[in-house]
Amino acid sequence: PPVAMTTKTPVYEYYGFVMYLVSFVALGIYLIWAYVPDEILHGLGITYYPKRYWALAIPIWLMTFIWLIFILFMCINLMNTAPFDSYYCITGMCVYNGKEIKLNQSV
């Protein structure tokens, strides 16, 4: 039977578009806060905002945290890897769970 075509847009597409717009607005606010001088912000009536130190500190801390996660994942994978002289590193048609089997023998 033919499949009915629907023109209804899934809700998660709307959420994705809203998050896209919100991210650009947040980036704009961040750039204005980071680059516009204090006199202009005070002239616009914006007097309560964090110090400029955080404009550099937050991205640096985030990138450091991301690199730390990558390095930790690599270290965990290396710790869980068998050494080169281990029987678990031997692979091929004649090996099953570290035990050698004959080709005509069933597993």
Image: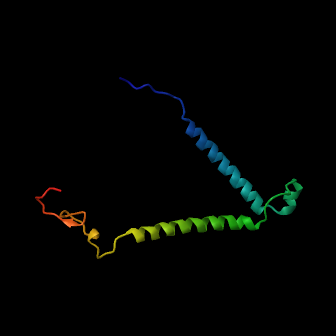
Q: Position of residue 60 (x, y in %)?
A: 65, 68
- Give above or below for 4 relative to 43: above
Coloured how?
rainbow
Q: Between residues 99 and 31, which one lies in front from this camera angle? A: 99
In this view, which residue lies farthest toward the top?
1
- Residue at image position (42%, 67%) is 77
- Give above or below for 17 relative to 70: above
Q: Between residues 59 and 34, which one lies in front from this camera angle? A: 59
User: Which quarter of the figure has residue 42?
Assistant: bottom right
- Residue at image position (49%, 27%) is 6
Left or right for 34, reference 75: right
User: Which quarter of the figure has residue 76?
Assistant: bottom left
In this view, which residue lies farthest toward the left?
104
Quadrant where the image shows the C terminus: bottom left
Left or right for 5, reference 48: left
- Residue at image position (28%, 68%) is 88
Q: Between residues 69 and 49, which one lies in front from this camera angle? A: 69
User: Which quarter of the figure has residue 67?
Assistant: bottom right
Left or right for 107, reference 16: left
Number of numbered tags placed on the structure image: 0
Q: Position of residue 65 (x, y in %)?
A: 59, 66
Q: Position of residue 34 (x, y in %)?
A: 75, 62
Q: Position of residue 87 (x, y in %)?
A: 26, 71
- Residue at image position (51%, 66%) is 70
